Amino acid sequence: MSLNTAHLNGGVLIHNGEQILLYSDGVAVEWSAQQSGAFQGTKKGLIYLTTHRVIFINKSGGDEMLSFSFPFVTLSEVEVEQPVFGANYIKGKVRAQPNGNWIGEAKFKITFKKGGAIEFGESMLRAAHFASRGGMQAPPPYVPPQNQWYAAPPPAYAPPPQDAKAAEAAQSAYYDPNQPQMAFIPPPAYYENPPSYNQATGKKTQ
């Protein structure tokens, strides 16, 4: 639904009350039925599944589409395809909503070059089902400020309020899904093995 509102400093921007369920690297997104320049060509990057939506983050910093958010309430005709030749993919339609930086409707095809389309698709449909049962609405678009800035620590790290009204206000702010909370950056794909340990000498060996 939202174009270029979910990326921040190489990570993905999520809201209070929203959680990342899983993510996958090495995906390619192709668009059709949309004439805007930001939707032209194949986009390569990472895709995230949260409790509220699907988020694509483009690895190319020079593309017009740096990120794209697919709230569950804007999706339709979503299917997981398993072709005999080629990588599995997810296809469907997404419609624009007010203040999403684009208009109309677009068809998408998300190809998983490194695998994982089946697991991602099943989890996505399950999360969308639970979201629809709860009457969930799409989180509002968020545009970070252009200048250098630092996010305030969450209320969980603040001193406890002294009175009931302050405590209620702090709790409401912490769980408000309309307020941005954090940016998630994936960990590295692998780590170097630590040096082995020699039990006889009690020293690490190189």
Image: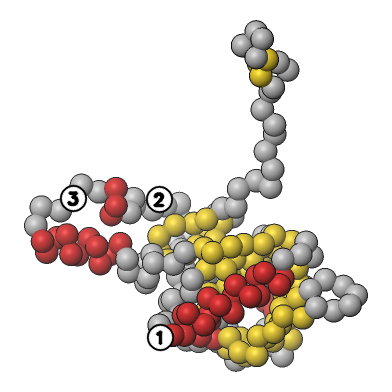
In the image, what residue type sits under mark 2? Answer: Tyr
Quickly name the residue at label 3: 160
Who's the residue at 65% across and 8% down the image?
Answer: 201
Q: Which mark is residue 97?
A: none
Element class at badge 3: loop
Task: Tell me the SS state at disc 1.
Answer: loop
Residue 174 in percent (x, y) is at 30, 62
Q: Left or right: 137 with respect to 164? A: right
What is the C-alpha distance between the residues marked 3 and 1? 32 Å
* Tag of residue 135: 1
Amino acid at pointer 3: Pro
* Residue situated in front as seen by the camera: 101 or 78: 78
Up-down relation of residue 204 to residue 63 (above or below): above
Dividing the picture into quadrants, the one containing residue 70 is: bottom right
Distance of mark 1 from mark 2, alpha carbons?
Answer: 33 Å
Query: Which circle, 1 or 2, is nearer the viewer?
Result: 1
